[in-house]
């Protein structure tokens, strides 16, 4: 599930950047770290959290399960452990794949036209 925009090119993001990106407070992210084993951002030399793209994808997934799908913390933990995708997430993935396919078809058509 690609949650980050294609324009985001940094390798690491601060907790405040991630909080702003997902529209949650930083303390919520710290709480989620204590609850979800799959969310463990590394810390830099200064002891500050640094989030990778994978960490941010996990945060988006947790937020989606808790806020959009209305799972409890325990329910969201189970969904993450099972690796199950919800209906909304699957339909979003299908749309994304359709866009990618369309892009490649256009590229092939341009290459064949030359």
Image: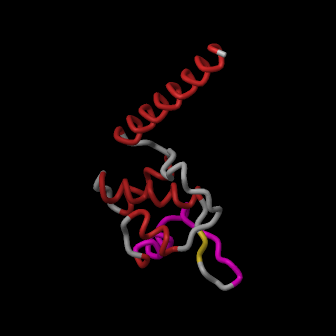
Query: Is residue 4 shown above or below 74?
Result: above
Q: Residue at x 51, y 74 (%)?
A: 15
**Per the image, is 44 magenta?**
yes
Q: Quadrant of residue 9?
A: bottom right
In this picture, residue 13 sits left or right of residue 74 = right
**Frontmost residue, 80 versus 27:** 27
Q: How far from the left and from the top, in percent, is residue 83?
A: 50, 46
**Frontmost residue, 64 versus 37:** 64
Q: Quadrant of residue 39?
A: bottom right
Q: How is the image coloured?
A: secondary structure
Spot the residue most to the front. 114
Q: How far from the left and from the top, in percent, is residue 33?
A: 50, 71
Q: Residue at x 43, y 64 (%)?
A: 21
Q: Residue at x 34, y 41 (%)?
A: 88
Q: How far from the left and from the top, in percent, is residue 65?
A: 37, 54
Q: How far from the left and from the top, in percent, is residue 69?
A: 30, 51
Q: Quadrant of residue 74?
A: bottom left
In this picture, residue 71 sits left or right of residue 12 = left
Q: Which residues are magenta?
A: 28-45
**Frontmost residue, 15 versus 61:** 15
Spot the residue most to the right. 45
**Per the image, is 84 magenta?**
no
Q: On the rendered image, what quadrant is the C terminus found in? A: top right
Q: Residue at x 48, y 52 (%)?
A: 80
How many circles with numbers are drawn on the protein?
0
**Frontmost residue, 59 versus 72:** 59
């Amino acid at each position: 599930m690609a949650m980050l925009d294609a324009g985001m090119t940094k390798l690491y993001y601060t907790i405040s950047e991630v909080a702003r990106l997902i529209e949650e407070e930083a303390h919520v992210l710290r709480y989620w770290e204590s609850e979800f084993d799959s969310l463990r951002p590394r810390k830099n030399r200064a002891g500050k959290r640094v989030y990778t793209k994978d960490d941010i994808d996990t945060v988006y997934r947790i937020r989606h399960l808790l806020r959009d799908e209305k799972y409890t913390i325990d329910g969201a933990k189970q969904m993450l452990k099972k690796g199950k995708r919800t209906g909304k997430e699957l339909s979003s993935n299908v749309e994304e794949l359709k866009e990618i396919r369309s892009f490649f078809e256009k590229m092939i058509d341009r290459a064949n036209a030359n």
